[in-house]
Amino acid sequence: MQFVSFAFLIFLPLAALINFMIPRKYRYIWLLAISIFFYLSIDLKASAVMAGSIVVTYFFSLLIDKVSVDSGEKRPVGAAVLLALAIAIEIAAMLIFRSGKIMGALGISFYMLKSVGYLVDVYKGQAAVEKNFAKLALFVSFFPQVVSGPIERAGNMLPQFSYPVTVDFDRMRDGFLQMLWGYFLKLVIADRLAIFVGNVYQDPAGAQGSVVLIATVMYSFEIYCDFAGYSAIAIGCARILGIDVMKNFDSPYMARSIAEFWRRWHISLSTWLRDYVYIPLGGNRKGTFRKYLNVLIVFAVSGIWHGSALTFLVWGLLHAVYQIAGFITTPLRDRLVELFKISRDSLSHRTVKTLFTFLLVNLAWVFFRATTLEQAITIIKKSFEFTPWVFTDMSLYSYGLTQKSFRVAIAAIIILVTTDILAYNGVEIREKIIAQSIWYRWVIMIAGILAILIFGMWGAGYNASSFIYQQF
């Protein structure tokens, strides 16, 4: 059962209705039951792997806490050994079951990071150990997040299971609007662009240069809409069920630097890497060289986390190089701004920085999408072959999208960019909709549903593709 399946559209309202009727004190039991059902409906073998991860996380957290309490020390050696062993087991499981040779890895990268973060927090004394097995199991397996995140922290999630909020109409309405936006991103934009990108990238060497360039730019929007769409659906779904989940995307393509991009893209992962990898390595506290080395390590880990192929490592290291280059050139850029009296707040300066950052990110996405380094190099080379006649000889529409469907994609991207520009400047469309009178709200919501039904990728022989990040 996927978020984009008809079964899920039946499952969620029933789950929310029963959740609403259950006393808040026992609601976590129901949430655990439906989370187990949801995951079992996707993959039985993967459920066994997740169950093993839950058991390891639960018992090791108890042992770490017991050793710490018995020793009276803040971070005793015995607890550190147990933590290292637990992390080794979690990482080994991820590597083994994600290898492609053994099935059962669905979402393991996401709930594994959840578990590791919880174990580290317990070891450091930053989170109280959860002795209720059901609540710990729910933290790891909460179904809106389990497949593709966001990667939540125990400090935010576990208290909500013990002291749940009242689920009211306002929460459900807000959650529904978030889900509606997520479905728009996924079904109208991401799945439509995926057809074009997939067909072009099957044989980039045989495609005309401008077609490859367009496909490359479209992939940047495809992966954004796919993952941001999933996150919006997951956050909205959780909100309907009375759980608040952290924001995962914040207009990332509006960023004016790579560092800012990573503060806005996959926020739950970037903050996890900051707190559990970058800072423990020393962060920026041990000199410039160590700072740069730590950045390289963090982004290498991010690349490896996404996949074992060398292309993912290159993608991660590219982002590290971008950031290090940004640090090194800061004095020079500051000097140029002062010399030429450039206003950093001017629209032109901000626009140039945003476009340049997007181009750097777009270049890195080529390695993320390509199956081999050779294919990535081919795509980059082809992108520089200017063939403007593709816009007039109709060859642009021979890669799975008709002219009308292509126009729908462009119009939807314009809506996305406009929404992100507004959000970047502090204007939240969802809040504006909620502030309207009931008739306007209903008109907008019905229009949104119709837009998804009419322009979403439905039809005989078509199944909504799995979310891209589901594989990690």
Image (cartoon, rainbow, N blue to C red):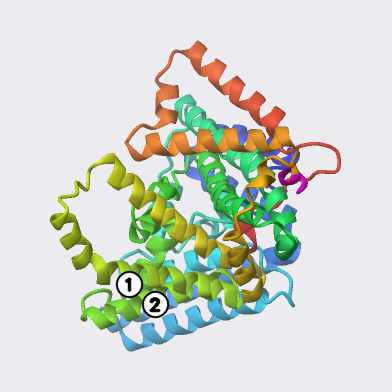
Determine the residue positioned at 34% across, 57% down: 257
Quarter of the image for residue 109 reads bottom right
Amino acid at circle 1: Ile
Magenta span contains residue 90:
no
Residue highlighted by disc 2: 296
* Residue 397 on the magenta span: yes
Please state which amino acid type lies under the numbered disc 2. Answer: Leu
Tell me which segment is drawn in magenta: 395-400
Residue at the spot 22% in from the left edge and 43% down from the top edge = 345
Vertical side of 185 occupied by 70: above or below: below
Q: Are marks 2 and 1 in contact (CB under 8 Å)?
A: yes
Mark 2 is surrounded, within 10 Å at the Cα level, by few (under 14), some (14 to 19) or many (20 or more) other residues, namely: many
How far is mark 2 from mark 1, CA to CA?
9 Å
From what the image shows, is residue 283 above or below residue 182?
A: below
Name the quarter where the C terminus is drawn. Answer: bottom right
Residue 5 horizontal/vertical position (percent): 73, 42
Residue sitting nearer the eye, 33 or 101: 101
Say few, some or many: other residues with alpha carbon within 10 Å of mark 1 (under 14 / 14 to 19 / 20 or more).
some
Disc ID at residue 324: 1
**Can the viewer see residue 73?**
no
- Give the SS element for disc 2: helix
Residue 179: x, y in percent? 56, 37
Q: Position of residue 28 (x, y in %)?
A: 52, 48
Say which of 171 and 214 sits in front: 214
